[in-house]
Image: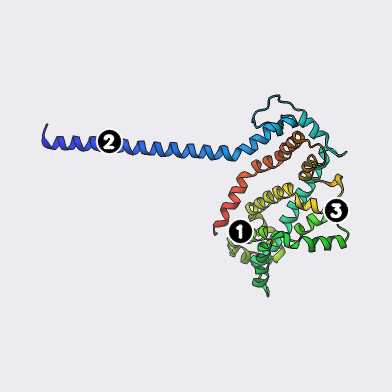
Amino acid sequence: MTETERITTGSTERSARLRSRARGRRLVRAGVFHLFSLAVLVVILYPAVWMLMSSFKPGNEIIGSVSLWPDSASLDNYATALRGIGGVSFWTFVVNSLILAVASVVGIVLSCSITAYAFARISFPGRTFFFACMIATMLLPFHVVIIPQYIVFNQLGLVNTYWPLLLGKFLAADAFFVFLMIQFMRGLPRELDEAARIDGAGHVRTFRSVILPLMKPALVTSSIFAFIWSWNDFFGPLLYLKNPTMYTMPLALRLYVDQTSTSDYGAQMAMAILALLPVVVFFMAFQRHLVGGVATQGLKG
């Protein structure tokens, strides 16, 4: 073998060893990354798994045992949860939550889309000032306005009704959704508005026939967030609803825990699982639209 062949062979073997070492390092890094990801996943999912397993345990076993798996699994907790509590059926709580969630979605989609169109497409005196005021409301803690809002609704006789929980949805009081839709509209070409005006369309026709059909990703994203936030809202119904027949699912969960008498933690866990199912189904059904709607906020047309 000539000197040139030996050099070539040695270089090839050395390159093969380097590639093998690099491949080994990549495999080690990938293994460590996946093990770390699995560990984080276990930590994140453990509370949900514990809640699911606890829904099959007797109440005394939930408090007195740290075991994840039930010693004697039973569906009694689900039967108790489905019977309701305090003379109110489980389905009454479900219907009340659905009423608030669906009405919140309708109110936010209608009012926030119209408000966003006004800020994004119409020039009027004070637009910048009012837009700044709207953004400032996102920085205002909710606890600051609790007492004034309650006094106003109480004087109007709206306490113990759903109006305090829904009125703001129909008046575009949720600045987050208005801002989200404004950002989406700013990415739509203004040539569409100009073409509509040339055809004789006013703002109402332009919004209804041109802008609104193109806002589907933003509308779906807002609807998903509005539904989930309304379904999971605990403080608002707790503040304004006094009649148990008007309670929502989060308030119904609280009824199973009584500091002065016996608490049924098993039924509470079972109802928590049942209350979680609509949110999971709703999210899974519209997950693709949610990801697409959020992703398009960074695009300009």
User: Percent position (x, y) of residue 30?
Assistant: 43, 38
Task: Looking at this view, name the residue that lies furthest to the top.
Answer: 72
For the residues labelled 2 and 1, the Cα–Cα distance comes to 53 Å
Mark positioned earlier in the residue sequence (2 or 1): 2
State which mark lies toward you, 2 or 1. Answer: 2
Task: Looking at this view, name the residue that lies furthest to the left.
Answer: 2
SS at badge 3 = loop
Residue 211 placement, left or right of 98? left
Q: Which residue is labeled 3 in the image?
A: 161
At a point 65% along the width and 69% down the height, the residue shown is: 132
**Residue 164 against residue 86 in the figure, above or below:** below
Q: Name the amino acid, label 1.
A: Phe
**Protein image colouring:** rainbow
- The disc at residue 184 is 1
At a point 69% along the width and 51% down the height, the residue shown is: 223
**Residue 206 against residue 52 in the figure, above or below:** below
Q: Which residue is labeled 2 in the image?
A: 17
Q: Name the amino acid, label 2.
A: Arg
For the residues labelled 1 and 3, the Cα–Cα distance comes to 34 Å
Q: Is residue 199 visible?
A: no
Mark positioned earlier in the residue sequence (2 or 3): 2
User: Percent position (x, y) of residue 273?
Assistant: 71, 37
Instruction: Check disc 1: other Cα within 10 Å, few if <14, some if 14-19, many if 20+.
Output: many
Q: Which quarter of the rendering shows the N terminus? A: top left
Tally the numbered discs.
Answer: 3
